[in-house]
Amino acid sequence: MDNTELISSVINVSDAWGGLKAKPKLVKNRENIVLDVTLNSGQRAAFRFHRPGYQSSQAIISELMWMEALTKQNFPCPSPIRALNKDLIVETKGLRTASIIKWVKATELKEKIVTADEKELISIFKNLGKITAELHNITDRINTNSFVRHKWDEEEFFSDNPAWGRYWENPSLSKQESEFIYKIKNKLRQTLGKIHNGDKGLIHADLLEENILVDTQKMWIIDFDDCGFGFREYDLATILIQHFNKRYFNQAKSALIEAYNKARNKFQTDTNTINFFIMVRSLVSCGWGISRAPLGSSVHREQAERALSCLELFNSYGS
């Protein structure tokens, strides 16, 4: 739909929440369409049209139920706003599923990292370790049995049909590179059962810089669109994947792990295991663009080169 049609649709759908005070402002039109809105109640919020075909209605409801439960425990993430009839989502005829969450007024973490000195960087990653442990600790106390979300497990990572795409078939890979990655994935699958600490549960699964916001007082976690049930250490690896080739990487990783282990109630992790899951994340991301980016997009090679670099750096399981 064009921009005029989109704005009109948002205004109409927002009636389920009591209507809008002002014209919506488009923030992002990617997988989910996100708009900055102000409800007639005066609440500033993020209106979302969810990507069709990615998550079922029940999965989106489960995502929002988790966020709602987290905010009730004072975890810093956006709180869903229920419609006037108390529903978490609104199904629209011929359009996407809609939801609304409270607006978080803060900046993306990457803007902070760009200007941070060494001391600030270590502090940032300590805070990231602490907030991730807090996320997992609180989630352990939430009844998630009724939640419907996909899994970030052995099948998702190492089967021949992972949800984010057959990463060894990334179109930018050479035949030799593709064969190498396919062989490595099978070796990593054999190792997984021996290396992870047994800590499984609901995870965010996409704790990248753009999904972590900061203000003068605290960090916020946003965009739970990819959350699912899986290995908790995958969340830590996802935080680090964007920094694996930075000069501060080893210090950041140590600070993250130390703070996480200190704050985590039950489970502990270590450098070797996090390196393992960084490789896993790099492979999963290598398949991400297959169904999302045009064949000639640079995204394919960027993700492929990162995966190959991570395997070169962290692979100790043979080729």
Image (cartoon, rainbow, N blue to C red):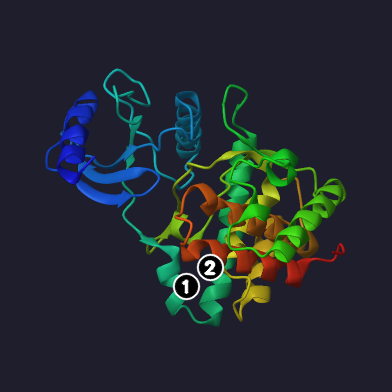
Residue located at (50% from left, 62% from top)? 299
- Marker disc for residue 113: 1
| Dot 2 and dot 1 residues touching (CB under 8 Å) | yes
**Which badge, 2 or 1, is on the more N-terminal residue?**
1
Picture quarter with the C terminus: bottom right
Find the residue positioned furthest to the top. 85
- Marker disc for residue 218: none
Residue 234 in sight in this render? yes
Residue 212 in sight in this render? no
Residue located at (56% from left, 54% from top)? 131
Residue 13 position, x and y percent, is 23, 28
Residue 30 position, x and y percent, is 37, 49
- Marker disc for residue 124: 2
Foreground residue among 197 and 298: 298
Which label sits in the foreground, 2 or 1? 1
Residue located at (63% from left, 24% from top)? 145
Q: Quadrant of residue 193?
A: top right
Residue 200 position, x and y percent, is 71, 40
Residue 273 position, x and y percent, is 78, 58
